[in-house]
Amino acid sequence: MTPFAAGLSSRTAAIRDRALRLVTHDNLFVVVKSATLVFLIRVAGAGLTYASMICLARWLGAFDFGIYAYVSVIITLAGLALSAGFNSSALRFIPQYAARQKWRRLSGFLARSYAIVFAISLIGALLGAGLVVALRGMIEPYYFAPLLVGLLCVPVWTLLSQGEVTARAFGWMHLAYVPGYIARPVLLILFVGGLLLVRPPDAVAALWGFFGACAVAALGQGVVLHRRIRERVTAASARHHTQHWLSVSLGFLVIDGFRMLLDNTDVLMIGRLLDPHSVAVYYAAIRTGGLVAFVSFSMIALAVPRFAQIHATGTRGELQKFVTGVIQMTFWPSLLAAIALALLGPFAMSLFGPDFEGGYPTMLVVLAGLVLRSATAPAEHLLNVTGHHRDTIRVYAVAALANVVLNLLLIPRFGIMGAAIATYTAMLSGNAWLYVLVRRRLGVSAFVFAGRARA
């Protein structure tokens, strides 16, 4: 055997042994096992969502698909804002109360959180629709009707999202992800595709299809979730700490709001500064590149509740070992997936139609940004579940502002490529700052090449 081959064999064995040590760690083994299920659901869901986007792009055409994409981003942002932060705080309170068998508080949190989310989202959607009507003269005519339909989607979208995080917090992964990531895109294809038998669909019809898909998925999820909670949670009279829950939830809302602005400012600003066609091409590029993100999503979705548990009951060394394992299982698969997508990118973009092939260079920027982001994937969540969410707020506030400024500067000059560069420059700068804060606050390294935790 040559020295090179011997060295390569030794390095391969070392990597294999390290991987085995990581996945046999008790906490990480549970997460990897569950994350495999989430990964498979997300693969199927990503494929179905991607297929629904391709169908809509071909059925609607680039212009109407751009309108649909623009409004769908507004639905997502409005749904997040009107959740009052309970779609994040549920991942903190439900596991804590269940682990400590505080059934009265758990029952109170579940009932009160859903009541607040539904009331606020419904009122907010109605007020938003009124605002759209009042400002009709300032809105491009082709956005007016789609915006009204989109705002009607917000309450059902918010309930579907709340059901997802509730099921996640209990560890019911099928129930968390199948309704939103499997059933919803299938129903969307069926609803909008069925319209083809009558007439060619437009953006408004696609958004009505979106409403129907979310409503059916949310209803089915809600029925099953209610039954399983009654079986799992010990019957007890509810105890409410509404002020405390709202205070913590609103803190998470600020974090989520700034993060969502980081993720979606580019689409919103392209819609305002350019045209629906540019929105369509950019949306296809970021969604294609975003397929890489489901690797990170699968691990982080399972890891967040365990971050809180280990921090509360374990040692810093245990937390470091777990965090390191999560990042290792996130970064390297993300890198491999990005390489594969880079090779298949031209073909993937062509599936949307001939107008979309020019988005490939933008997709490469997205891939690079997502891989680099996965190198510090848990940083934000570590701060949030250990009581340092105010640090995250400050980071995302600055990053979101920088994102707006960079998009304003780069979109007029470089078009959709400028939007991608601006977004990931701001995003990765924020992630680097979060890494430093995790190191300072927790003594833990949330980086793919981690050192030891501070004693």
Image (spheres, rainbow, N blue to C red):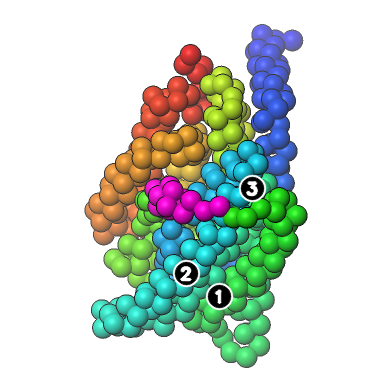
- The mark nearer the N terminus, 1 or 3, is 3
Cα separation between marks 2 and 1 = 18 Å
Q: SS at mark 1?
A: helix
Secondary structure, magenta segment, majority class: helix
Q: In which quadrant of the rendered view does residue 334 lie?
A: top right
Residue at the extreme front: 237
Q: Nearer the viewer, residue 451 or 347?
A: 451
Task: Assess disc 1: are there few (<14), some (14-19) or many (≥20) residues with their C-alpha within 10 Å of its C-alpha.
Answer: many
**Residue 174 horizontal side relative to residue 427, left or right:** right
The residue type indicated by label 1 comes to: Phe
- The mark nearer the N terminus, 3 or 2, is 3
Q: At x 61% / y 50%, what residue is drawn? A: 104
Check disc 1 and report the residue beneath it: 211
Give x and y (percent) for residue 36.
Answer: 71, 42
Front of the two marks 2 and 1: 2
Q: Is residue 352 visible?
A: no
Instruction: Using the image, tell me which numbered label, if any, was put on residue 103.
Output: 3
Task: Assess disc 3: are there few (<14), some (14-19) or many (≥20) residues with their C-alpha within 10 Å of its C-alpha.
Answer: many
The stretch of residues the image draws in magenta is 239-253
Check disc 2 and report the residue beneath it: 119
Q: SS at mark 2?
A: helix
The residue type indicated by label 3 comes to: Trp
- The answer to if 81 sits in the magenta stretch is no
Vertical placement of residue 363 versus 216, above or below:
above
